[in-house]
Every structure is written in C-alpha cells, then in structure tokens.
Image: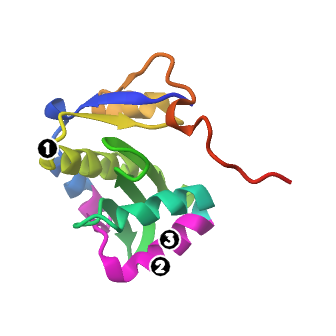
Amino acid sequence: MTDMLVKLYNLPPLESHLAAQTAHGITLRRAIAPEKHHVLAWVRAHFSEFWASETDIGFSRQPPSIWLATLDSSLIGFACWETTARGFLGPMGVTEAARGRGTGAALLLAALHDMRAHGYVYGIIGAVGPVDFYERVCGATVIADSTPAGYADMLRKSD
C-alpha cells in the first residue's frame, strides 16, 4: 500500500459535499472528547485495533483531529489526521452499509480542509487502499517508492 500526496491549497470546495450529506440525513462534525470511548470501540469493531490506536491519538489534539459522520445519531464513518505522523491523513473509513452516498469523500475533504486551516500546505495520505478514490476526490498523487514508508517496522501480532 502506497502513500499519496495532496496539495491542500488546491482542494475542491467542501460545501457541496456537506449539503449532499445533509440531503441524505447525514451529519458531519468534529469529534469531542466525551465520546472517545464510543468512537474507539466503533473503530475497533468495524475496522481494526491498529486504526483504533491511531484514532485514540486524534483525541489528544485540541481540538480533536477526528471528523465523524452520523446518521440517526449512529456513527457511520470517520476520518482522522495527524495520528500516525505529522501531516498525515488517516485512518478513515465508512461502514460498508453506509457507502455509496459520498460520505467518504465528504469526510476526506473535511479532514483535508481542517489540515489546511491548521497551516499545512501539503498532506500525505498514508498506506492508501483505493488510489483512484483519492485521485478523483482530492487530486492526490502517488508518492513513488513509499511502500511501506513509516509502517515498515510496525509491531504486529504473531501467533
């Protein structure tokens, strides 16, 4: 899985994505500290322990560097930035049942716009899965020879 680079000074506008989410009854907002336990349990259950560990770091920021998507007061997606390394976006994900409504794109752009508002000019999306999604939504480009980058010596469970 490769890393990608995003020009934060050239992002698509966020407003139309937020409006589309509102039309689907989905709310995007920044996470707040009192819901940390709920968000981490949800990330752990729907994605992985690794992502829960990274997301935990996002709650140590003030304000938290975590964006949430909710539908009927239930969490359906999230996006974090600066949880693994400075200037990195991720992890982020939307539950399989909630996909297809543009929620992932809206979360991605909300987090990237937040990074820009905090002074970053470029962002790195670490260990991406769907390269074409990031190219299409935010104009990200693949960073050559970036596998496994910062994840090379990461501890993993051994049986």
Magenta span: helix, strand or loop, mainly?
Answer: helix
Look at the picture and state if 20 lies above or below 134.
below
Of residues 71 and 152, the one drawn nearer to the viewer in this rendering: 152
Kind of residue indicated by mark 3: Leu
Going 44% across and 48% down the picture, which residue do you hit? Answer: 84
Could you say whether the residue bearing mark 2 is in a helix, strand or loop? helix
Kind of residue indicated by mark 2: His
Left-right relation of 93 to 109:
right
Left-right relation of 52 to 9:
right
Q: Which residues are magenta?
A: 21-45
> Disc 2 designates what residue?
38
| Crowd class of label 2 (few under 14; some 14 to 19; many from 20; radius 10 Å) | few
Marks 3, 1: nearer the viewer: 1
Q: Is residue 128 among the parts visible in the rendering?
A: no
| Crowd class of label 1 (few under 14; some 14 to 19; many from 20; radius 10 Å) | few
Using the numbered discs, state the Cα–Cα distance from disc 2 to disc 3 in whole angstroms: 6 Å
Image coordinates of residue 150 in percent, x first then y, are 50, 36
> Disc 1 designates what residue?
119
Q: Are marks 2 and 3 in contact (CB under 8 Å)?
A: yes
Q: Count up the numbered dots.
A: 3
- Quarter of the image for residue 41 reads bottom right
